[in-house]
Image (tube, rainbow, N blue to C red):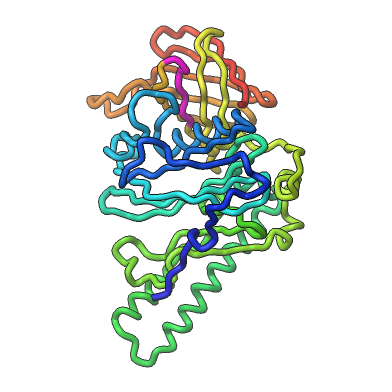
Amino acid sequence: MKKKFLFFLLISGLSFSQQKSLKIIDLQPKSEDFAFPKVSYAEKPLVENKINTYLQVDQLEYIPGSEGSPSTLVSTGKTSYSNYVYFYGWEKLETPKNILSIAMNGEASGAYPEGFDIWKNFDLRTGNLINAKDLFQPNSIKTVENLIQKSIKKEINDFLIQLKSEKNPSEEVLDQIAIYEGCFTDFTLDGIEYYFAKNKIRFIAGRCSNHAMRALDELDSHVVEFPYKDLGKYWSSYAKNLLSDSEKIDKTSINNKLYKGKIDGKYPITVLINSINEDDSFSASYWYDKNKKLINWRGEFVHNHFSITEDDYHNEELKQWIPRALIEADLKGNKIIGTWQDYRTKKYLKLELEEL
């Protein structure tokens, strides 16, 4: 059976000359079911802090410096998504100077266990996660998505031709044909994994089969790669500077960014904004810097304005979430300014945040 080795093929344990002071170690306590990366970047402590905060909050729902083991929630199925998640390993990939790409693999157990590979890419000038859409000019995003989709469709169609050429196909082959004829291929940059290699970018799209049929799926995940030079006319100015080792930092979207500030001018908080969806909905996590307990936000972001609900608890009798607060705020440059309103008392408190 043909297999694709998605990231171990290009992995290097070397400390690349342009990133000499950047090192990655295992987040402690490490165990058989928990090997998670922790970045050390003495040259840029803010970048180090932002990367580690993002990784641990996003993947582990753990706030660095809080009580308990970082692996507790994921290993006991007590995260917001309830799955048991095990991290078995990570690798640092060889990339251009300004980029850190980390590959992680593990297993998630919901209704059934499922292995996973994920890639996270960071801008080493800022510590921000690199969003795929920020890499391309707005009017080129659909074109790049079409190039990815076209490559995936070709791979599937070529394999279908091979399968259908068999004169007396077995039941297994007929099942394979059904899998590939019904395969979803309309991937967008929002719904695809990717990582940077030394001279090219690789996109990884999900496989055609469900869990039950995976053993028949010889193609598995779809890997589409482009040398950087081949995407030259589509890159945004941000991507061009990122890939050319330039220190010039262009403005990027609000997606996956950390903000720091205060409620009522006296309660320090940190906020992680998740990706804004195509329907303008989004979620975020925040915590008071003093007690470091994750609190979830959900809402909309339209025309640089946030309308957010902070839930308090779920009422089983009413079968709905009861709000704790309502937030209205505006994005102004690198700041978020607005109000945090207590749902019960209706009291308004000022909210002031600034991008880290």
- Farthest residue to the bottom: give it: 167
The spot of residue 102 in percent (x, y) is 52, 48
Residue at 42% across / 42% down in the picture?
36
Work out whether residue 222 or residue 246 is closer to the camera in this orientation and state it: 246
For residue 103, above or below residue 259: below
Side of 44 where 269 appears, left or right: left
Q: Is residue 285 in sight in this rendering?
A: yes
The magenta stretch spans residue 287: yes
- Which residue lies at the image location 42% right of the left edge and 21% below the top edge? 292
Above or below 49: residue 243: below
In the rendered image, which quarter is residue 129 located in?
top right
Report whether residue 137 is seen: no
Total number of numbered labels?
0
Percent coordinates x, y for residue 19 in the rendering = 64, 44
Q: Nearer the viewer, residue 269 or 166?
A: 269
Relative vertical location of residue 279 with respect to residue 14 in this rendering, above or below: above
Residue 330 placement (x, y as % from top left) = 62, 23
Magenta run includes residue 7: no
Which image quadrant: the C terminus? top right
338 vs 211: above or below: above
Name the image quarter holding the N terminus: bottom left
Secondary structure mostly taken by the magenta-highlighted segment of the chain:
strand
Q: From the viewer's perspective, is 112 left or right of 10? A: left
Q: Residue at x 37, y 33 (%)?
A: 70
Identify which residue is drawn at 58% across, 21% down.
329
| Front residue of 12 and 71 | 12
Dividing the picture into quarters, in which one does residue 262 lie?
Answer: top right
Where is residue 226? Give x, y as percent.
Answer: 64, 63
Relative depth, front residue between 285 and 326: 285
Q: Is 241 left or right of 272, judged from the image as shown?
A: right
**Where does the magenta region start and end?**
284-290
Q: Residue furthest left?
A: 317
